[in-house]
Image (spheres, rainbow, N blue to C red):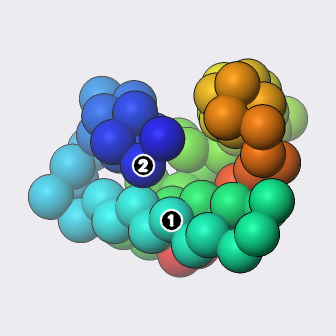
Amino acid sequence: MRDLVERIIKQIVDYPNEVKVQEIEGGRITIVEISVAKEDVGKVIGREGRVANALRTIVGAVASKLGKRAIVEIIE
């Protein structure tokens, strides 16, 4: 899941070298933390949160296939 999110985010941002994706596992819940450059936060969130919601949908679908729940957090 981490690799998928990282690959998607690197295609969106202007500074792909500063993208860091961390996956924290805890029982049935997985937290995916996305850290990008300050200039790229708006691109990752998208207009009215559309990109962030799409990311959450993709990660949620992958997590449900694994029988888990996923939370996506975007960190500056």
| Corner quadrant of residue 55 | top right
Q: Nearer the viewer, residue 41 or 55?
A: 55
Q: Going 82% across and 48% down the picture, which residue do you hit?
A: 69
Provide residue 22's location: percent of width, then percent of height. Answer: 44, 68
Contact (Cβ within 8 Å) of mark 2 with mark 1 = yes
Q: Nearer the viewer, residue 39 or 33?
A: 33
- Badge 2 crowding class, 10 Å Cα cut-off, few under 14, some 14 to 19, many 20 or more, is some
Q: Going 67% across and 34% down the picture, which residue do you hit?
A: 66
Q: Is residue 50 visible?
A: no
Residue corresponding to mark 1: 23
Q: Nearer the viewer, residue 27 or 63?
A: 27
Residue corresponding to mark 2: 2
Q: Nearer the viewer, residue 67 or 57?
A: 67
Provide residue 5's location: percent of width, then percent of height. Answer: 45, 40
Provide residue 44's location: percent of width, then percent of height. Answer: 55, 44
Q: Going 21% across and 49% down the picture, which residue do you hit?
A: 16
Could you tell whether 55 is left or right of 53 in the image? left
Q: Is residue 52 above or below residue 62?
A: below
Disc number placed over residue 7 in the picture, else none:
none
Secondary element at tag 2: helix
Provide residue 30's location: percent of width, then percent of height. Answer: 69, 60
For marks 2 and 1, give the CA distance: 6 Å
